[in-house]
Amino acid sequence: MTNPTTVCGIDFGTSNSAIAIVRDGATELVAVEGPHTTIPSAIFFPAKGEKPLYGRAAIAAYAIHEPGRLMRSLKSILGSELVTEKTAVGGKYQSFEDILVGYIKHLKAKAEAHAGCKISHVVMGRPVHFVDDNDVVDARAEAKLRDIARAAGFKSIAFQFEPIAAALSFEHTLKQDELVFISDIGGGTADFSIVQVGPARRAKSKRADDILANDGIRVGGTNLDMRLSLAAVMPHLGSQATSLKGLDLPRWPFVDLATGHRIHTIATPKNLHTLQQIYSDCAQPEVFERYLEIIRQQSGHLLAGSVEQTKIDLSAQQEVVIDLAETVPGVTVTATKQQFDTAIAFELERLEGAIRATLDAAGQRGSAITTLFLTGGTSAVPAVKALLLSMLPKAKVIEGDLFNSVGFGLALDAQRQFVMRKAA
Protein backbone atom coordinates (compact mmCIF):
# COMPACT_ATOMS: atom_id res chain seq x y z
CA MET A 1 0.00 0.00 0.00
CA THR A 2 1.01 3.66 -0.36
CA ASN A 3 1.99 5.61 2.73
CA PRO A 4 1.33 9.30 1.94
CA THR A 5 3.91 10.41 4.51
CA THR A 6 6.69 8.37 2.87
CA VAL A 7 8.41 10.40 0.16
CA CYS A 8 11.77 10.13 -1.55
CA GLY A 9 14.52 12.01 -3.31
CA ILE A 10 16.51 10.55 -6.21
CA ASP A 11 19.97 11.75 -7.15
CA PHE A 12 20.33 10.31 -10.65
CA GLY A 13 23.96 11.05 -11.41
CA THR A 14 26.16 10.71 -14.45
CA SER A 15 28.52 8.34 -12.65
CA ASN A 16 26.64 7.27 -9.51
CA SER A 17 23.09 7.48 -8.17
CA ALA A 18 21.54 7.51 -4.70
CA ILE A 19 18.05 7.54 -3.21
CA ALA A 20 16.81 8.57 0.22
CA ILE A 21 13.38 8.41 1.83
CA VAL A 22 11.58 10.33 4.55
CA ARG A 23 9.41 8.01 6.59
CA ASP A 24 7.41 9.34 9.56
CA GLY A 25 9.66 12.40 9.65
CA ALA A 26 12.97 10.48 9.64
CA THR A 27 15.31 10.78 6.64
CA GLU A 28 17.16 7.62 5.61
CA LEU A 29 19.53 6.71 2.82
CA VAL A 30 18.51 3.54 1.01
CA ALA A 31 20.89 0.62 0.48
CA VAL A 32 20.53 0.25 -3.28
CA GLU A 33 23.10 -2.45 -3.99
CA GLY A 34 23.97 -4.81 -1.17
CA PRO A 35 25.09 -2.61 1.74
CA HIS A 36 25.95 0.31 -0.54
CA THR A 37 23.90 3.53 -0.50
CA THR A 38 25.25 4.51 -3.91
CA ILE A 39 25.03 2.61 -7.17
CA PRO A 40 27.02 3.21 -10.36
CA SER A 41 24.78 4.59 -13.09
CA ALA A 42 25.48 1.56 -15.26
CA ILE A 43 23.29 -0.98 -17.03
CA PHE A 44 24.39 -4.24 -18.61
CA PHE A 45 22.10 -5.90 -21.15
CA PRO A 46 22.91 -9.62 -21.62
CA ALA A 47 23.10 -10.58 -25.28
CA LYS A 48 20.37 -13.21 -25.05
CA GLY A 49 17.75 -10.86 -23.66
CA GLU A 50 17.86 -11.80 -19.96
CA LYS A 51 16.97 -9.17 -17.38
CA PRO A 52 19.42 -6.26 -17.32
CA LEU A 53 21.93 -5.89 -14.51
CA TYR A 54 22.48 -2.59 -12.71
CA GLY A 55 25.34 -0.88 -10.95
CA ARG A 56 28.32 -2.89 -9.74
CA ALA A 57 26.73 -6.09 -11.01
CA ALA A 58 26.54 -4.57 -14.50
CA ILE A 59 30.20 -3.54 -14.44
CA ALA A 60 31.25 -6.96 -13.09
CA ALA A 61 29.46 -8.78 -15.91
CA TYR A 62 31.17 -6.56 -18.47
CA ALA A 63 34.57 -7.00 -16.80
CA ILE A 64 34.46 -10.78 -17.20
CA HIS A 65 33.41 -10.39 -20.84
CA GLU A 66 29.88 -11.72 -20.50
CA PRO A 67 28.21 -11.39 -23.92
CA GLY A 68 26.16 -8.22 -23.91
CA ARG A 69 26.35 -4.46 -23.80
CA LEU A 70 27.31 -2.08 -20.99
CA MET A 71 25.87 1.43 -20.93
CA ARG A 72 27.17 4.20 -18.66
CA SER A 73 26.83 7.98 -18.23
CA LEU A 74 23.28 7.86 -19.60
CA LYS A 75 22.27 11.05 -17.79
CA SER A 76 24.38 12.88 -20.37
CA ILE A 77 21.85 12.14 -23.13
CA LEU A 78 18.94 13.96 -21.43
CA GLY A 79 19.89 17.22 -23.10
CA SER A 80 20.36 15.67 -26.55
CA GLU A 81 18.16 14.38 -29.35
CA LEU A 82 19.60 10.93 -28.69
CA VAL A 83 17.17 10.35 -25.79
CA THR A 84 14.30 9.45 -28.15
CA GLU A 85 16.39 7.34 -30.52
CA LYS A 86 16.54 3.55 -30.35
CA THR A 87 19.56 1.33 -29.90
CA ALA A 88 20.15 -2.43 -29.97
CA VAL A 89 20.33 -3.97 -26.49
CA GLY A 90 19.52 -7.48 -25.31
CA GLY A 91 18.56 -8.68 -28.77
CA LYS A 92 16.03 -5.95 -29.48
CA TYR A 93 15.77 -2.23 -30.08
CA GLN A 94 14.86 0.06 -27.20
CA SER A 95 14.75 3.82 -26.95
CA PHE A 96 17.23 5.45 -24.60
CA GLU A 97 14.21 6.90 -22.82
CA ASP A 98 12.86 3.41 -22.07
CA ILE A 99 16.31 2.32 -20.88
CA LEU A 100 16.33 5.23 -18.42
CA VAL A 101 12.81 4.34 -17.26
CA GLY A 102 14.09 0.88 -16.39
CA TYR A 103 16.93 2.33 -14.34
CA ILE A 104 14.66 4.70 -12.36
CA LYS A 105 12.20 1.83 -11.82
CA HIS A 106 15.05 -0.16 -10.34
CA LEU A 107 15.85 2.63 -7.87
CA LYS A 108 12.17 3.06 -7.01
CA ALA A 109 11.81 -0.67 -6.28
CA LYS A 110 14.80 -0.54 -3.94
CA ALA A 111 13.30 2.41 -2.06
CA GLU A 112 9.92 0.71 -1.73
CA ALA A 113 11.49 -2.51 -0.47
CA HIS A 114 13.35 -0.47 2.14
CA ALA A 115 10.25 1.50 3.16
CA GLY A 116 7.86 -1.42 3.09
CA CYS A 117 5.28 0.54 1.11
CA LYS A 118 4.64 2.06 -2.30
CA ILE A 119 6.15 5.50 -2.87
CA SER A 120 4.41 7.88 -5.25
CA HIS A 121 6.06 11.23 -4.38
CA VAL A 122 9.59 12.06 -5.50
CA VAL A 123 11.90 15.06 -5.79
CA MET A 124 14.32 14.44 -8.64
CA GLY A 125 17.68 16.15 -8.54
CA ARG A 126 18.74 18.10 -11.58
CA PRO A 127 21.84 20.11 -12.52
CA VAL A 128 21.54 23.87 -12.67
CA HIS A 129 21.96 23.48 -16.44
CA PHE A 130 21.50 20.22 -18.32
CA VAL A 131 23.13 22.00 -21.24
CA ASP A 132 25.05 25.27 -21.35
CA ASP A 133 23.46 28.45 -22.70
CA ASN A 134 20.26 26.95 -24.09
CA ASP A 135 17.17 27.46 -21.94
CA VAL A 136 14.86 25.74 -24.44
CA VAL A 137 16.87 22.52 -24.50
CA ASP A 138 17.33 22.72 -20.73
CA ALA A 139 13.57 22.89 -20.17
CA ARG A 140 13.07 20.01 -22.59
CA ALA A 141 15.59 17.88 -20.67
CA GLU A 142 13.74 18.47 -17.39
CA ALA A 143 10.43 17.64 -19.05
CA LYS A 144 11.93 14.43 -20.39
CA LEU A 145 13.19 13.48 -16.93
CA ARG A 146 9.68 14.15 -15.59
CA ASP A 147 8.23 11.82 -18.25
CA ILE A 148 10.77 9.16 -17.30
CA ALA A 149 9.93 9.42 -13.58
CA ARG A 150 6.21 9.22 -14.35
CA ALA A 151 6.70 6.19 -16.59
CA ALA A 152 8.69 4.58 -13.75
CA GLY A 153 5.59 4.83 -11.55
CA PHE A 154 5.82 8.11 -9.65
CA LYS A 155 2.61 10.18 -9.45
CA SER A 156 3.84 13.43 -7.90
CA ILE A 157 7.16 14.67 -9.27
CA ALA A 158 9.09 17.79 -8.31
CA PHE A 159 12.63 18.98 -9.03
CA GLN A 160 15.38 20.62 -7.06
CA PHE A 161 18.79 21.86 -8.11
CA GLU A 162 21.43 19.42 -6.91
CA PRO A 163 23.57 22.05 -5.13
CA ILE A 164 20.47 23.30 -3.26
CA ALA A 165 19.81 19.74 -2.12
CA ALA A 166 23.41 19.58 -0.90
CA ALA A 167 22.82 22.85 1.00
CA LEU A 168 19.76 21.37 2.70
CA SER A 169 21.80 18.33 3.68
CA PHE A 170 24.49 20.57 5.18
CA GLU A 171 21.92 22.77 6.94
CA HIS A 172 20.50 19.68 8.64
CA THR A 173 23.67 19.60 10.81
CA LEU A 174 24.00 23.31 11.66
CA LYS A 175 23.63 25.11 14.97
CA GLN A 176 24.35 28.62 13.62
CA ASP A 177 23.71 30.63 10.45
CA GLU A 178 26.19 30.39 7.58
CA LEU A 179 26.64 31.93 4.14
CA VAL A 180 27.64 28.82 2.25
CA PHE A 181 29.05 28.27 -1.20
CA ILE A 182 27.97 24.83 -2.40
CA SER A 183 30.29 23.15 -4.88
CA ASP A 184 28.65 20.05 -6.36
CA ILE A 185 30.91 18.67 -9.07
CA GLY A 186 29.99 15.16 -10.13
CA GLY A 187 30.57 13.05 -13.18
CA GLY A 188 28.86 15.26 -15.73
CA THR A 189 28.23 18.75 -14.38
CA ALA A 190 29.63 21.36 -12.03
CA ASP A 191 26.89 23.15 -10.07
CA PHE A 192 27.37 26.05 -7.70
CA SER A 193 25.00 27.80 -5.30
CA ILE A 194 25.30 30.48 -2.64
CA VAL A 195 22.73 29.94 0.08
CA GLN A 196 21.93 31.37 3.49
CA VAL A 197 21.40 28.41 5.82
CA GLY A 198 20.83 27.90 9.51
CA PRO A 199 18.68 26.22 12.15
CA ALA A 200 15.99 28.92 12.13
CA ARG A 201 15.72 28.86 8.35
CA ARG A 202 15.21 25.13 7.84
CA ALA A 203 11.70 25.26 9.29
CA LYS A 204 10.59 27.69 6.55
CA SER A 205 8.32 26.16 3.91
CA LYS A 206 9.53 28.70 1.31
CA ARG A 207 13.26 29.20 0.84
CA ALA A 208 13.54 31.30 -2.30
CA ASP A 209 14.85 34.35 -0.39
CA ASP A 210 17.68 32.25 1.09
CA ILE A 211 19.01 31.22 -2.33
CA LEU A 212 21.24 34.06 -3.50
CA ALA A 213 22.59 32.51 -6.71
CA ASN A 214 22.82 29.36 -8.80
CA ASP A 215 25.07 28.61 -11.74
CA GLY A 216 26.62 25.63 -13.41
CA ILE A 217 28.35 24.25 -16.49
CA ARG A 218 28.77 20.87 -18.14
CA VAL A 219 32.17 20.13 -16.67
CA GLY A 220 32.56 17.06 -14.48
CA GLY A 221 34.67 14.05 -13.73
CA THR A 222 34.05 12.48 -17.12
CA ASN A 223 35.57 15.58 -18.78
CA LEU A 224 38.67 15.26 -16.61
CA ASP A 225 38.87 11.53 -17.39
CA MET A 226 38.69 12.33 -21.10
CA ARG A 227 41.51 14.87 -20.88
CA LEU A 228 43.72 12.48 -18.91
CA SER A 229 43.02 9.64 -21.33
CA LEU A 230 43.80 11.79 -24.36
CA ALA A 231 47.03 13.04 -22.79
CA ALA A 232 48.38 9.84 -21.23
CA VAL A 233 46.79 6.81 -22.88
CA MET A 234 45.64 7.57 -26.41
CA PRO A 235 49.17 8.30 -27.74
CA HIS A 236 49.89 4.61 -27.03
CA LEU A 237 46.87 3.66 -29.15
CA GLY A 238 47.75 5.76 -32.18
CA SER A 239 46.47 9.29 -31.51
CA GLN A 240 49.87 10.72 -32.45
CA ALA A 241 50.40 8.41 -35.42
CA THR A 242 50.22 9.73 -38.96
CA SER A 243 48.82 8.58 -42.27
CA LEU A 244 51.05 7.30 -45.06
CA LYS A 245 51.02 10.85 -46.43
CA GLY A 246 52.22 12.26 -43.12
CA LEU A 247 48.84 13.72 -42.10
CA ASP A 248 47.34 13.46 -38.64
CA LEU A 249 44.87 10.65 -38.08
CA PRO A 250 41.22 11.62 -37.47
CA ARG A 251 40.68 12.69 -33.87
CA TRP A 252 37.16 11.34 -33.31
CA PRO A 253 38.08 7.68 -32.64
CA PHE A 254 40.29 8.68 -29.73
CA VAL A 255 37.89 11.26 -28.33
CA ASP A 256 35.03 8.75 -28.45
CA LEU A 257 37.08 6.04 -26.74
CA ALA A 258 38.09 8.54 -24.05
CA THR A 259 34.49 9.68 -23.45
CA GLY A 260 32.39 7.34 -21.31
CA HIS A 261 28.99 7.90 -22.90
CA ARG A 262 30.46 7.70 -26.44
CA ILE A 263 32.22 4.33 -26.09
CA HIS A 264 29.16 2.28 -26.95
CA THR A 265 28.69 4.25 -30.20
CA ILE A 266 32.05 3.32 -31.73
CA ALA A 267 31.34 -0.22 -32.94
CA THR A 268 28.70 0.55 -35.58
CA PRO A 269 29.23 -1.05 -39.01
CA LYS A 270 29.91 2.37 -40.54
CA ASN A 271 32.47 3.31 -37.89
CA LEU A 272 34.18 -0.09 -38.05
CA HIS A 273 34.58 0.32 -41.81
CA THR A 274 36.09 3.79 -41.30
CA LEU A 275 38.44 2.50 -38.59
CA GLN A 276 39.68 -0.22 -40.94
CA GLN A 277 40.40 2.43 -43.60
CA ILE A 278 42.35 4.46 -41.01
CA TYR A 279 44.35 1.34 -40.15
CA SER A 280 45.14 0.65 -43.80
CA ASP A 281 46.37 4.23 -44.25
CA CYS A 282 48.30 4.41 -40.97
CA ALA A 283 52.08 4.80 -41.09
CA GLN A 284 52.35 3.11 -37.67
CA PRO A 285 49.73 0.35 -38.01
CA GLU A 286 51.10 -1.68 -35.10
CA VAL A 287 50.15 1.16 -32.71
CA PHE A 288 46.66 1.70 -34.12
CA GLU A 289 46.15 -2.07 -34.01
CA ARG A 290 46.01 -1.69 -30.20
CA TYR A 291 43.05 0.64 -30.59
CA LEU A 292 41.28 -1.81 -32.89
CA GLU A 293 41.85 -4.69 -30.48
CA ILE A 294 40.14 -2.75 -27.67
CA ILE A 295 37.13 -2.24 -29.93
CA ARG A 296 37.08 -5.91 -30.98
CA GLN A 297 37.26 -7.09 -27.37
CA GLN A 298 34.67 -4.51 -26.26
CA SER A 299 37.10 -3.37 -23.57
CA GLY A 300 36.53 0.36 -23.88
CA HIS A 301 34.77 0.68 -20.53
CA LEU A 302 37.54 -1.29 -18.81
CA LEU A 303 40.02 1.23 -20.19
CA ALA A 304 37.83 4.10 -19.03
CA GLY A 305 37.67 2.56 -15.56
CA SER A 306 41.47 2.35 -15.41
CA VAL A 307 41.76 6.01 -16.38
CA GLU A 308 39.16 7.04 -13.80
CA GLN A 309 41.03 5.14 -11.07
CA THR A 310 44.27 6.79 -12.17
CA LYS A 311 42.64 10.21 -11.77
CA ILE A 312 41.65 9.26 -8.22
CA ASP A 313 45.11 7.88 -7.41
CA LEU A 314 46.78 11.07 -8.68
CA SER A 315 45.05 12.91 -5.84
CA ALA A 316 47.63 11.34 -3.50
CA GLN A 317 50.50 10.37 -5.80
CA GLN A 318 52.77 12.25 -8.17
CA GLU A 319 52.68 9.51 -10.78
CA VAL A 320 50.69 6.36 -11.44
CA VAL A 321 51.51 3.42 -13.70
CA ILE A 322 48.52 2.23 -15.71
CA ASP A 323 48.83 -1.45 -16.57
CA LEU A 324 46.76 -2.05 -19.69
CA ALA A 325 47.14 -5.82 -19.48
CA GLU A 326 43.38 -6.42 -19.59
CA THR A 327 42.96 -4.27 -22.67
CA VAL A 328 46.36 -4.03 -24.41
CA PRO A 329 48.68 -6.84 -23.23
CA GLY A 330 52.27 -5.79 -22.70
CA VAL A 331 51.60 -2.05 -22.62
CA THR A 332 52.00 0.12 -19.53
CA VAL A 333 51.47 3.86 -19.30
CA THR A 334 52.82 6.29 -16.74
CA ALA A 335 50.57 9.24 -15.92
CA THR A 336 51.85 12.12 -13.78
CA LYS A 337 50.05 14.66 -11.63
CA GLN A 338 51.69 17.48 -13.60
CA GLN A 339 50.49 15.93 -16.85
CA PHE A 340 46.97 15.67 -15.45
CA ASP A 341 46.90 19.26 -14.16
CA THR A 342 48.13 20.52 -17.53
CA ALA A 343 45.57 18.41 -19.39
CA ILE A 344 42.63 19.81 -17.40
CA ALA A 345 43.70 23.47 -17.59
CA PHE A 346 40.81 24.33 -19.93
CA GLU A 347 38.25 22.73 -17.62
CA LEU A 348 39.73 24.60 -14.63
CA GLU A 349 39.42 27.87 -16.54
CA ARG A 350 35.76 27.15 -17.23
CA LEU A 351 35.15 26.27 -13.59
CA GLU A 352 36.77 29.52 -12.51
CA GLY A 353 34.43 31.46 -14.77
CA ALA A 354 31.36 29.70 -13.37
CA ILE A 355 32.48 30.29 -9.75
CA ARG A 356 33.02 33.97 -10.47
CA ALA A 357 29.64 34.23 -12.21
CA THR A 358 27.94 32.68 -9.16
CA LEU A 359 29.59 35.20 -6.81
CA ASP A 360 28.66 38.08 -9.09
CA ALA A 361 25.04 36.93 -9.35
CA ALA A 362 24.82 36.83 -5.55
CA GLY A 363 26.46 40.24 -5.22
CA GLN A 364 29.11 38.71 -2.96
CA ARG A 365 32.88 38.84 -2.75
CA GLY A 366 34.66 35.56 -2.33
CA SER A 367 35.94 36.71 1.05
CA ALA A 368 32.35 37.04 2.36
CA ILE A 369 31.66 33.30 2.09
CA THR A 370 31.91 31.67 5.52
CA THR A 371 31.71 28.03 4.44
CA LEU A 372 32.66 26.06 1.35
CA PHE A 373 30.66 22.83 1.24
CA LEU A 374 32.05 20.20 -1.11
CA THR A 375 30.03 17.37 -2.58
CA GLY A 376 30.32 15.31 -5.75
CA GLY A 377 33.38 13.14 -6.35
CA THR A 378 35.17 15.64 -8.61
CA SER A 379 35.20 18.27 -5.85
CA ALA A 380 37.93 16.13 -4.23
CA VAL A 381 40.35 16.55 -7.17
CA PRO A 382 43.25 18.60 -5.68
CA ALA A 383 43.46 21.09 -8.55
CA VAL A 384 39.70 21.72 -8.35
CA LYS A 385 39.75 22.14 -4.57
CA ALA A 386 42.76 24.47 -4.80
CA LEU A 387 40.90 26.65 -7.31
CA LEU A 388 37.88 26.94 -5.00
CA LEU A 389 40.04 27.79 -1.97
CA SER A 390 41.90 30.48 -3.91
CA MET A 391 38.60 32.17 -4.81
CA LEU A 392 36.97 31.77 -1.37
CA PRO A 393 39.96 32.58 0.87
CA LYS A 394 38.15 32.92 4.23
CA ALA A 395 35.76 29.99 3.92
CA LYS A 396 36.12 26.98 6.16
CA VAL A 397 35.91 23.78 4.15
CA ILE A 398 33.29 21.19 4.93
CA GLU A 399 33.54 17.97 2.94
CA GLY A 400 30.11 16.43 2.86
CA ASP A 401 29.41 12.86 1.91
CA LEU A 402 30.68 13.21 -1.65
CA PHE A 403 28.20 10.70 -3.03
CA ASN A 404 25.18 10.88 -0.69
CA SER A 405 24.73 14.53 0.31
CA VAL A 406 22.56 15.39 -2.67
CA GLY A 407 20.30 12.35 -2.31
CA PHE A 408 19.83 13.03 1.41
CA GLY A 409 19.01 16.68 0.72
CA LEU A 410 16.53 15.79 -2.01
CA ALA A 411 14.61 13.65 0.49
CA LEU A 412 14.58 16.57 2.94
CA ASP A 413 13.20 18.73 0.15
CA ALA A 414 10.56 16.09 -0.62
CA GLN A 415 9.45 16.34 3.00
CA ARG A 416 9.21 20.13 2.64
CA GLN A 417 7.42 20.08 -0.71
CA PHE A 418 4.99 17.21 -0.19
CA VAL A 419 4.43 16.91 3.56
CA MET A 420 5.10 20.26 5.26
CA ARG A 421 3.23 22.30 2.65
CA LYS A 422 0.26 19.95 2.77
CA ALA A 423 0.20 20.20 6.57
CA ALA A 424 0.38 23.99 6.37
Image (tube, rainbow, N blue to C red):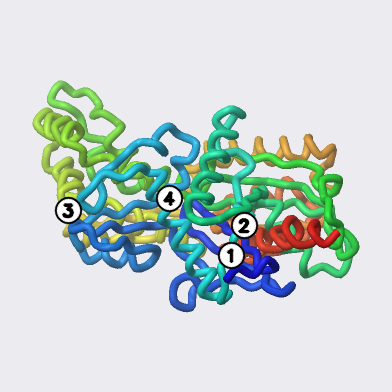
Residue type pointed to by label 2:
Val
Q: Using the image, tell me which numbered label, if any, was put on residue 119.
A: 1
The reply to whether discs 1 and 2 touch (Cβ–Cβ < 8 Å) is: yes
Q: Position of residue 316 (x, y in %)?
A: 51, 64
Mark 1 or mark 3, which has the lower sequence index?
1
**Above or below 229: residue 411:** below
- Residue at (67% x, 51% y) in the render: 163
Residue type pointed to by label 1:
Ile
- Residue at (31% x, 61% y) in the render: 52
How far is mark 1 from mark 3, CA to CA? 42 Å
The residue that disc 2 covers is 122
Residue nearest the observer in this picture, 97 or 354: 97
Q: Using the image, tell me which numbered label, if any, was put on residue 297.
A: 3
The residue that disc 4 covers is 100
Q: Position of residue 258 (x, y in %)?
A: 34, 44
- Residue at (71% x, 48% y) in the render: 390
